[in-house]
Amino acid sequence: MKLPAHLHLDKNNIPYEAKSFSPETEKGAANVARVLDFPERQAVKTLVFQVVDTGECVLVMLGGDQNAVSGNLKKAIGSRNIQMAPPERVKEVTGYIIGSIPAFGWQPAGFRSFLEATLMNEPILGTGAGQWGEEVMITPDNLVKASGATVVNLTVKSQ
């Protein structure tokens, strides 16, 4: 089965491996990593944040076991007034429901995406393909290429 995420990668000649898991699997990066047998750090969470003042939405990608440091996230986005986008806004902006947002293939020109810098040290990353039960295994460099992400420190607190 080819989903829009797969078609985006194919069209741009970006190598990847498609993997499937049971759609009955409980939601969450940790569960995907467990059933597909790879480390939770390598299961990419795709989170959509909204700048409250402007309404701009951005994609933030973290490892399954990571949380963003608020100050780092605000600095990367360039606003102190940010929040997780509500589910209806996420669907409106991405075309996907929370829990199955692919890291690429849906962003309009100029849409900003950020990838946690430590993920560049991983040999392979898994990201949702846009439908629960479908995962894309991709190298960090190819994830950046596919998503147009800016690689930035989101998880290590500055001194």
Image: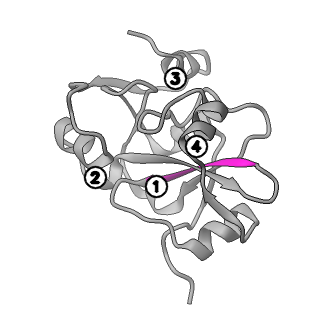
Q: Is residue 122 left or right of residue 87?
A: left
* Crowding at mark 4 (Cα within 10 Å: few <14, some 14-19, many 20+): some
Q: Amino acid at mark 4?
A: Val
Residue behind mark 4:
144
Q: Secondary structure at mark 4?
A: helix
Q: Secondary structure at mark 1?
A: strand
Would residue 135 be counted in the magenta stretch? no
Q: Position of residue 94 (x, y in %)?
A: 61, 32
Q: Mark 1 and mark 2 in contact (Cβ < 8 Å)?
A: no
Residue in front for this viewpoint, 21 or 37 = 21
Question: Which span of residues is magenta-colored?
Answer: 56-62
Q: Earlier in the sequence, mark 3 or mark 1?
A: 3
**Quick check: 59 above or below 96?**
below
Q: Is residue 66 left or right of residue 55?
A: left
Q: Amino acid at mark 2?
A: Glu
Residue in front for this viewpoint, 10 or 109 = 109
Predominant SS along the magenta part:
strand
Residue behind mark 3:
5
Q: Is residue 134 left or right of residue 119?
A: left
Dot label at residue 40: 2
